[in-house]
Every structure is written in structure tokens, then in C-alpha cells.
Image: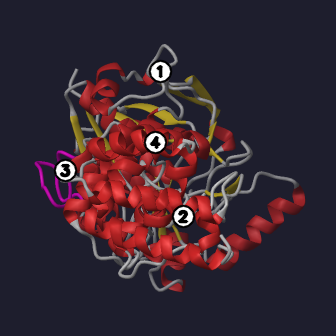
Amino acid sequence: MTVRVRFAPSPTGPLHIGGVRTALFNWLFARHHNGAFVLRIEDTDRSRYVEGSIDLITEGLSWLGLDWDEGPDKGGPYGPYIQSERLDIYHQWTDWLVEHGKAYRCYCTPERLERVREANKKAGRRVGYDRRCRNLSEEERQKLHEETNGEFVVRFAMPLGGQTVVNDLIRGNITFNNEELTDLVLMKSDGFPTYHLANVVDDHLMEISHILRAEEWIASAPVHAQLYEAFGWEMPQIAHLPVILNPNGKGKLSKRSARFTSEGMSIPILLHEFPEEGYVPTAILNFLANTGWHIGEDQEVFYMDEAIEKFDISNVNPAGTAFDINKLQWLNGVHIRQMDPVELAKLLKPVIEAHGYEVNAGALLAITPHIQERLKLLPDVIEFTEFLWKAEFEPVAPEELIQNKMDAGGQQKALQAAYDKLQTLDKFDADTIEAELRTLVDEIDVKAGQLFGSLRMAVIAQIVSPPLWPSLEIVGKETVLERLKLAIESLDALIPEAE
């Protein structure tokens, strides 16, 4: 079986995460069957076209690693791959349908169509076109052509009786009564085709074997099936993917929805928001693959090479799945922990710089393995490592140096002992520092937390930080001693003179 699938977004703005999941399932299907994944831009709705959207789409897919085999930038044997560059093709096949009695020119004005709509609503009838122009005589057609200055749309002549059965690879046979369907517009008065015509013509000419598209297009499936029949073409196999639901499980997660909040967390909806908020591509792909499909055996964490091997469209659940932000953040943390520390440091550097800090590459590479286990989102790096990047050290108040069951005098003596010990070290690495200071705890008869907690606040000046020993090593001996001396002196203000 030769597999060719396509992802065909409209350039109406950034990619919605539901569209990304559609792209992913098409990509997985193509890669599983060693087939072709085609990127096609469906830009025939010029009223909704947004400048720069095509770049947003291609950059977003590239960031995720969803590579395409044919497309606007890569070319291929079936181009062009942007629909606005294929207008002659659509006009050719529209004319063919009209000439063969499969479609007709409709001269009804928007005002008349609105009157028909309202009348049908009031009468409780199906809201749709009344087919006024379907069976006009040549004389009537010519008269309307003159009255409208030759402005018309082309409508498909849908069969008036019987049923259309569409076999869905996920849902099985879906049956539609033709009498309940309307004669949809195929070519608009501006000379651009509608989705219904353009996608059928393109899928046929581009030899698409399988169509994996969103559930919202189920209602148009019988029209598309009848269009294939009218042309005498074989319809590709089709599957309608379930929607991604709002976090509460009610309603589709829409591009036009406000950002949701769950347990105080921001819910990203558009693809470009995910890197901005610190998600990594492998986690997003893992999350989306698990949204409507399961790799099996309750496995939650996996990478795309394994998903490609096991992907089966028949295992997609037709029911919608709620967007679980907690699951996504958990997965993001897992994927961060499984990254090579050097690659992770490359991702963390621009995040830190975006907060206005100058990054010491050596310090970042050194600290990354020690914070990797604690990150859920990339911006969490700021909370843990800010002490490394601040231009000026901001010591804590002396009260914050004093640990549980310690007074100012005792804390000062403990810090002075640590200062004296660290000052003697020729080798200032994490292992040596830890060994010497743990020995010191016994020598001066304090608890480990009473010394180490105060030492952390004196040198790092933040409660949340990486492990203490590598942090001290990275800060460096000279700076550690300077900050310890500053802390020791600050405690003088809390010690009674008699003491």
C-alpha cells in the first residue's frame, strides 16, 4: 500500500494545538507506513488570510520536528502546494462539473439568501439554499446573468434522494440522507474555490491515499464523497479525528477561546505559546500522541520513534479528550530530566537571557545537571539559578541567616568556623567542600541544617536553589569567602554587646 497523507492548514493565524495534533497523527501514519507527508496551504478564504501565517505554520512544525516530504518550500511532483497558486486548476474542474450537469451557476444575491434563511427558520424547515437556480431555463439563466452583471457562484448539484455512506477508519460507516443536505458552493464569486472543491481536486491530483482530518468536517464528508463520484474518481480512505476538549471536558478547545486557568495554571492553546512558556517539543508530541490514541500497556512516556513503530489509526478513540495541563507539565518535566545536559543548557541559555541576564556558559553547563531534576518548565531555571547571573550580590537580612534553635552569636561562630575551614582548602570542588563541612558539623557540635542552611542564605541568598555543594563550587572560593565574611559581620548587629 502506497501511503500519501497531507496536512492542509489555513493561514489564518498561529496553529491551534488541535491542528498540531492533526498534523502529528498524519505524520505518524505516513512514517509508520514509509509513506509521504505532504504540507499544503489552503489559503482560498482570502477574507481570513493573515500575513505571516505561513511562516508561523512552517516554523512551528519544524520546531516540533514534524518534517514534510513535499510542500511550498520543498516542492514536489504535485505542486504548487499553495492553493492560491492553483486557481486555473480549480476553474478547469469547476467548468467540467457545470458542463456535465454536476454543478450549476447560482445568481442569488446575499440579500435573497438571507431572506430564504429567515423564512426557513420561521417555518421550521431545514436552513439551506432552496435550489432556485438549479433548474433554470437558458433564458432565465441569461436574464439573471445580465441582472447581476455576470456575478455568480457555482454550486454542487447534490443528489436529491437516497443516502450517502462514508466509511470512516475510526468510526465505521456513517450514513447521510441526501435530502437533508444542501447544494454547497464550490466556486465563489471572487474566483476562489471553497474548501469543498479545492480539497477534493487537490487530494485527487496529489494522489492522497488517506485523509486524516478533524471531526468538525464529518458533516461535509457526504458532499465530498458525492464530488468524487461526480468526477469519477476514487475517494481516499478517510478518518475524522476526535476533538481536544476544554480542561473541564466541556466543549472544543477553540482558537477563539479565552485562555483557561486550571489550579492557577495558564493553559496554552496556540502552538507558539508553548515554547514561550517553556515546553519542549518531545513533551508536546508525547502529550498530543496520547490525546486520543494510546501507545499501549498504559505507557505514558515515549518518543516519536516508538510511536511511529506502533501507530495504528484504528486504535484512535473517537471520543474527545480533555486538555490535561497537569499531565502536560508532568511530561515536560520527565522529558527535561531525560535530556542530555548540554542540549538542555542550550535551551536554558536564551530563557535566562530573555530575563535580562548575561549568561556565563561555563557556569550554566556546570549547574544544569544539578537543577535538571527540579525543572517542570524551562523558565523554572530562573528561580533556581538567579544567584549566578545577578550583576550585584544582594545579601539577605541578618535575621534570615539564623536557623532553627540558633541565636545570632552561635550562628556567627558556626559561619566563622565554616569560613576558616573553606579558607584552607586548596581544592575547591563539591566533594571536597561537602566532606570538610560535614566533618566540621561534628567538630563544632551543631546540626547539619543549622550550618548548611545558614551557609546557603549567606552565599546564595535564596531559599530555592540547586544543591549546596556544586553551587559553592560554581560560585568559586574567592566569592564564597567574601559573602561569608559579609554575613558574619552583618550578625554583629543582632548580638548584644555583653555577648
Residue flagged by tag 1: what amino acid is it? Gln
Badge 2 vs badge 1, beta-carbon distance below 8 Å: no
Numbered mark located on residue 427 in the image: 3
- What residue is rendered at 27% in x and 32% in y? 30
3D distance between C-alphas at marks 3 and 1: 46 Å
Classify the position of the N terminus by image quarter.
top left
| Residue 35 at x, y percent in the picture | 21, 31
What residue is shown with label 2? 412
Instruction: Give the label, 3 or 1, closer to the camera.
Output: 3
Residue drawn at x 87%, y 54% is 124
Magenta-colored span: 66-81
Number of labels in the image equals 4
Whether residue 462 is visible:
yes
Residue matched to label 1: 299
Q: Nearer the viewer, residue 105 or 113?
A: 113
Residue annotated with mark 4: 443
**Mark 1 or mark 4, which has the lower sequence index?**
1
Instruction: Give the secondary structure at mark 1.
Output: loop
Question: Looking at the image, do the residues carrying marks 4 and 2 touch, with CB atoms under 8 Å apart?
Answer: no
